[in-house]
Amino acid sequence: MYNRFFKKWSESLKIGFILFLVVSCTISLCACGTEDSTDITSGLVYDENDNTWSSEDEKLKPLANIMKRECGKSSDIKGSYILGTDDNIIFIGGINATDVNGNKVDAFTTYEIGSLTKMFTATAVLQLCEDGKISLDDTLDKYFPEFKYGKDITIEQLLHMRSGLRKDYVTEETFLLENGEINIEEWKRYYNDGFSDEEFLDMVFDDELMFEPGSDYLYSNVGYNLLAMIIEKVTDKTYSEYLQENIFDVCGMTHTSSMKTGDVTSVPEFVPSKDAPDEDPYEYVDTLYMLFIKQARGAGDIHSCAYDMLLFDRALISGKLINEESLSEMFDTDGSYGCGWMKYGELLHHPVDGIYFHGGETWVYKGYNMYCNTEKYGNIYLIQLHPTKAGDEYSVECMQNIVMSLK
């Protein structure tokens, strides 16, 4: 059972923990469970049967109807949804789930967003490139002189997942004793954020590369964690401080945090996989929320809500965060991966022009952010945040059907 359990955790960010609720403001978001000072439902029609808000604009209504249909397909569909443009919100859904206060989830409910974090890390790095503090051509030995392969790997290769570094922070062998048994104390120490940066770097730098840097593509959480460390080295700020000042505050993202525990307001739901129906996470952990934040920073540490993600998308694409040249670098997916974004369909060898996305996953949480540049509607953004990985096929179908409607 351990092997199955560990492999799930090593492919995503796993556990966590909750202590308190997000800040409540004074104005109620009509019929939503969360209170907030921003009424984003103005002009939308509320349906109390499915807890959705939909645009009645004749041009936008077809898209709203698709979202209502997609969100009503199954009771396995759970979480917060937003579909919007640069100027309008088309659809909001708080589907089949409640927050920690027992209210229906909504656009301000916070989730672990997993690898959607990489969008923010990439944005921060490109900002620092614009400021002249980092160069895409910098090699890692400039920041990590002890890394034997440092002179061979560039910042640009880290951003585009072409560094040759392994995917995950630790391997299954990390916690094996000489007799092959699991060192459970070391395992718990790691997942309770007990490993130092030095220990983490020693493990990474002791590895051989998977391939010659620049010659191939391999998704790497490790690479984005190193980028977060580089951000800290060149700014003399913590990763979370830099993001707060230069991205979250700039975008008005008041329900988003980095490097924190205890501020997620959605309730996680563990559903065993079909190949391990008897799996019980509480054999190993006391909580389903993620606790190991240090090694996740830059790759999967951020918590956010659907509305804040929409604000980020709008600010990013409008040029409020990075300039046109940096945006071009961000969405350059010639090697299968841009900078925190992938071209929709590219990994299936059927890329769709003008449509980009990324998925985010921790052990229990799952999310998607999709950006579409269209002639008919302008820029469209679809955010889905889920408190469970069950029903993920419906999340994928939702994106597919929105894409099909845009053709």
Image (spheres, helix red, strand yellow):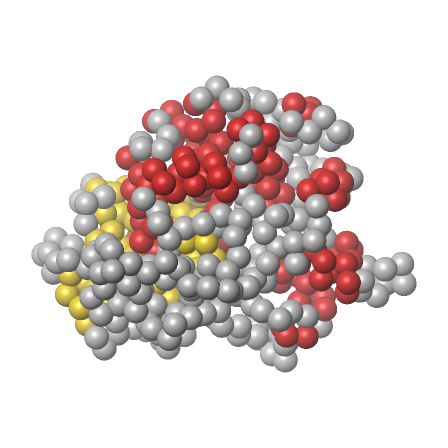
Residue for point 60% across, 78% down: 277
Q: Is residue 364 visible?
A: yes
| Residue closest to the eye, 81 or 276 | 81
Residue sitting at x 34%, y 73%: 103
> Is residue 68 rendered to the left or right of residue 123?
left
Name above or below for residue 272 compared with residue 400. Answer: below
Q: Position of residue 222 (x, y in %)?
A: 63, 43
What number of labels is visible? 0
Q: Residue at x 42, y 63 (%)?
A: 21
Quarter residue 209 falls in = top right
In depth, the one of 156 and 39 nearer the eye is 39
Residue 345, compared with residue 165, is above or below; it is below
Q: Does residue 353 lie above or below 326 as drawn?
A: below
Q: Position of residue 136 (x, y in %)?
A: 53, 24
- The structure residue drawn at horizontal position 40% and vertical position 28%, both measured from the top left corner, is 326
Viewer-closest of 369 and 18: 18
In the image, residue 53 sits, relative to residue 230, either above or below, namely below
- Residue at the extreme bottom of the image, as rendered: 278
Q: Nearer the viewer, residue 341 or 201?
A: 201
How far across and down, in percent of the image, does residue 62 sit?
Answer: 17, 59
Write down the quadrant of residue 7 in the picture.
bottom right
- The answer to whether 366 appears left or right of 214 in the picture is left
Residue 338 shows in this picture: no
